[in-house]
Amino acid sequence: MSEITVNTEWLSDCSGCHIAIVDLHEKILSVLQAVKIQRCPVLTDVKGYPKATLGLVSGAIRNEHDRHAALEMRKACDIVIAWGSCAVFGGPAGAGNIHTPAEIARAVYLDNKTTISAHPPSREVSPLESVVSPLDSAIEVDLYLPGCPPHPLFVFEALSALVEGRAPEVSRRSVCAKCKRAMEKSEVAEIKPHSEGIPNSEQCFLSQGYTCMGSVTIDRCLAPCPANGVPCTGCAGATMQVLTEPNRDIRTEIAERMSRLTRIPGEEIVAAIERGAKSHYSYTMASSMICRKPTFHIEKWIRDEESAYEAGNLS
Ligand code: SF4
Ligand code: SF4
Ligand code: SF4
């Protein structure tokens, strides 16, 4: 293949996805024999959008600048890849959809106890849009690479597919498929916060009372978290089953599995996940495939939680 020219752009995100691009370093040459990176905010000082074969866009659409940058990338690049869970699903910034831009500005600039001379943003700050949305709400996307950030194995598979002119493999497996922990029936009767106790290293977290999200999360990572003693928090986004089937939902799927493995009633598990909705849905709540589900009432769950907190009824 002749030389591939690449532009990258980051929208509203944490910059981790761009560090992951740098981490690919010369390994990328094993897939693309000749790559010329033209525009990349962490590598080059190119402000414009030169014509390119490939465009990698990380981050969500949160403000007017994001939308403008996404449109410029689309005009300049033959193929646009939504790079990482923020671009694909909206990512953690999606938690902002629970609040209005005015509430967010007030919380960040005026009511922030660590800001000494608080004042609202000047006109030079790009205005927030009313909601956070994934990249494909602004432009057409050719390829989706979820992951926080995308794992090199799946990046190389996607790039090889592009070079060979075939569709990349799409996994329908969940993180559980790569996890070596054993799902076994236990006598556990209470949900545990992730910070509590020292989990058994061989047993499934669900069997131990921890709300691991591996069974509802697409495998884009080879399950490093459960292998290292940490429950999955769903950073690669939901499985195809959860995304595409209207009545399958993160909380009901986990509750069904966990209640079979423990003595914890399913309703208790559902209620606990709703109370922690901003965490359990943190990567996907801005995605229309999740937030338009008939069973999805995240604003109510969070309002109920905040009312209970204000009334001092939180355990
Ligand atoms: S997907 Fe994860 S690593 Fe990438 S920008 Fe979003 S939060 Fe950061
Ligand atoms: S739920 Fe979590 S701990 Fe259990 S098998 Fe799946 S990934 Fe592993
Ligand atoms: S195991 Fe879960 S939280 Fe950990 S990297 Fe994979 S998807 Fe993300």
Image (spheres, rainbow, N blue to C red):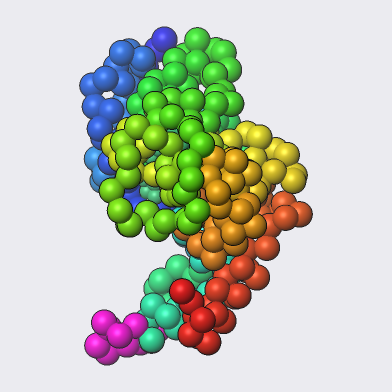
Q: Residue furthest bottom?
A: 117
Classify 264 as above or below 278.
Answer: above
User: Does 25 sit left or right of 148 as displayed?
Assistant: left
Q: Which residues are magenta?
A: 112-120
x, y percentage for residue 277?
54, 61
User: Does 296 sit left or right of 55 as displayed?
Assistant: right
Identify which residue, 86 or 294, lies in the foreground.
294
Identify which residue, 223 or 11, lies in the foreground.
223
Asked if residue 156 can be seen in this view, the reply is yes
How many marks can you see? 0
Classify 301 as above or below 25.
Answer: below
Main SS, magenta residues: loop
Residue at 56 percent across and 81 percent down: it is 307
Classify 174 as above or below 108.
Answer: above
Residue at 31 percent across and 13 percent down: it is 30
Residue at 35 percent across and 26 percent down: it is 152
Classify 80 as above or below 112.
Answer: above
Asked if residue 90 can be seen in this view, the reply is no
Residue at 75 percent across and 44 percent down: it is 246
In the image, residue 118 lies in the stretch drawn in magenta? yes
x, y percentage for residue 267?
64, 57
Identify which residue, 306 or 163, lies in the foreground.
306
x, y percentage for residue 140?
62, 39
x, y percentage for residue 310?
50, 85
Can you tell me which quadrant of the image ligand 2 is in? top left
* Quarter where residue 292 is shown: bottom right
